[in-house]
Amino acid sequence: MEAIALLIPIALVLIVLVIAVFLWAVRSGQYEDMEGPAHQILMDDDERQD
């Protein structure tokens, strides 16, 4: 019973941290353009001269 009393608060703190990090990522624009980088890999870059 003592283990449950310890594990439940730890789990709740972890859930709050995960939600906070997710909300920070959404607000900072991490999920703005999910397909852009994938399309850039497939396109030829004619402007660059090596």
Image (cartoon, helix red, strand yellow):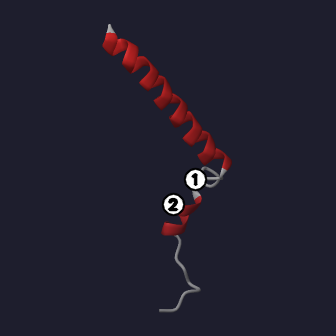
Residue 12: x and y in percent read: 49, 23
Q: Quadrant of residue 1?
A: top left
For label 1, the SS is loop
Mark 2–mark 1 distance (CA, rounded to whole Å)? 8 Å
Read off the residue under disc 2: 38
Amino acid type for the residue under numbered disc 2: Ala
Closer to the camera in the image, 15 or 47: 15
State the residue lying farthest toward the front: 2
Q: Is residue 22 left or right of residue 1?
A: right
Q: Position of residue 25 (x, y in %)?
A: 59, 47
Residue at the right extreme, as displayed: 27
Residue underneath mark 1: 34
- For numbered disc 2, what is the local secondary structure? helix
Amino acid bearing label 1? Met
Picture quadrant of residue 3: top left
Q: Residue furthest top?
A: 1
* Residue in the image at 52% along x and 92% along y: 49
> Picture coordinates of residue 9 (x, y %)?
45, 21
From this view, report whether residue 7 is shown above or below residue 43.
above
Do the residues bearing badges 2 and 1 touch, measured as CB atoms within 8 Å? yes
Report the residue at 54% width, 62% height from top.
37
Out of 28 and 37, give the one closest to the viewer: 28
